[in-house]
Image: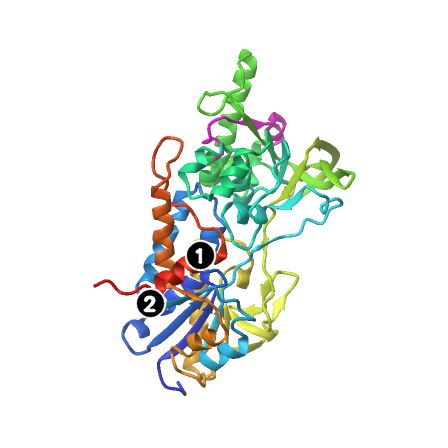
Amino acid sequence: MSFSQPFRLAVIGAGPAGIYAAETLARRPEVKSGELTVQCDIFDAMPTPFGLIRYGVAPDHPRIKGIITALHRILGRGDIRFIGDVEFGTDLTFEEIHERYDAVIFATGALKDADLDIPGIDLEGSFGAADFVAWYDGNPDYPRTWPLTAQHVAMVGNGNVALDAARMLAKSSDELLRTEIPANVYEGLRSAATTDVHVYGRRGPAQTKFSPLEARELAHPHGVQIVLDERDFDQITDAEWEVIKADKRTDQIVQTFVGWLEEQKRREAAGEAPADAHGGPVTRRLHLHFWHKPVEVLGEDGKVVGMRFERTKLDDGGALVGTGETVDYDLEAVYRAIGYFGSALPGVPFDPARGVIRNEAGRVTKDVGTPIPGVYANGWIKRGPVGLIGATKSDAVETITCLLEDLAEDKLLPAADRDNDSVLRLLDSKGVEYTTWDGWTALDAHEIEAGSHETDAEGQPRPRIKVVEREDMVRVARDGMFAPAEG
């Protein structure tokens, strides 16, 4: 190295991608042995850490939410500093980071909904599912209310986000009281007019992108009937069934669907009333439609009144093709859930076609083959919004390997200001009310305490109640940061 230790790293984004990048560096042999000393600061625009795990996962997913426990353990060690409520580009610029850090890793994720380029998509009543998720997860940057006046709702997409959003629309609000949903979300869902949620996928039951667990969870809510169309399964060929059975994950998903379809057919043949998966009465229906390609959102007077789809199939080569047959559905709202898309950052090279920071193996590039010294990317903003947490970890290994190679080859420019607290003084001088790890633990305790004073529909204390307003989060966090020490 051409500069003295410690090596100073800034990470922009405190979700899994950012935290795992910092943790991957901290666990490298040269760091653990003391050969390389690292000072790492993780910044986030939110007052809280954990990114989409806090603001992009359905609140009734305790297993996924459990990832926070692992991330909490990493940040709680104290060797990685969290600084929240800091907006990159305004509160902290690229130049100010460059002056104080030897390298920066951008791990800001992908927050926007991918576009669905069909006629009528901009009608009133057409929404992005990512925006809906942010609302029910209590993201402070979104409105406190959501229009839930539609009885018949379309969810376009066959991934985990589509299923999460569809389940939240179909599920009883009282069942959600056992989660951390804020009061405004509970009230919104309790008064929702929804009776039927239709989930549309372009491909068949075997090509869905969600997990077996996600599929099974659709039937968990009481009062929800799963409705399937036998035709969607009849067009699966014998050869395709063999392929399905050869893949454990796919077979589990399809067999779950088949089990629901068989029970639906049995009840119809016996003249029995529809029932939910628990044998109880039906209050809402969740329709799963396969082989449906969106063609147009239908409207009247500027509002959604329906949607047109083309039936699809797989050709002999396995490619998806249209059949020419179209079908219309009466609907009052449409949600597109076909993926996320990254946002450009001030002064950082961006590929607008892919929605990612321009990079090669994590090295941010001005153009092909020209990396910017000391600037890296990780996670969805690096490779696009595909893959789960495991992919983010492997991403981090690749990015950190490139960083250490560049460090060993003296390709990084040393920061001029090596004072560890210089960035805090800078933020103070700008009047930025940043939060810290101590602030987060205070807010965490505050939310858990709030939940302990309220009960769910079964009389059990709630796990927590999220604080929604940004000002309230910052106030609670900063009160905790500056509270006098006990004793």
| Image quadrant in which the N terminus is located | bottom left
Above-or-below relation of 298 to 285: below
Position of the C terminus, as image quadrant, is bottom left
Residue 149 quadrant: top right
Query: Going 53% across and 16% down the picture, which residue do you hit?
Result: 267
The residue tagged with tag 2: helix, strand or loop? Answer: loop
Mark 1 and mark 2 in contact? Answer it, CB < 8 Å: no
Name the one closer to the observer, 361 or 431: 431
Give the Cα distance between marks 1 and 2: 32 Å
- Identify the mark at residue 473; answer none if there is no mark: 1
The answer to whether residue 157 is seen in the rendering is yes
Note whether residue 243 is visible: no
Residue 68 located within the stretch drawn in magenta: no
Q: Quadrant of residue 285?
A: top right
Number of numbered discs: 2
Disc marking residue 27: 2
Position in image of residue 316 (x %, y %): 66, 40
Instruction: Read off the magenta span.
Output: 218-237
Horizontally, is 256 left or right of 125 in the view? Answer: left
The x and y percentages for residue 446 are 36, 52
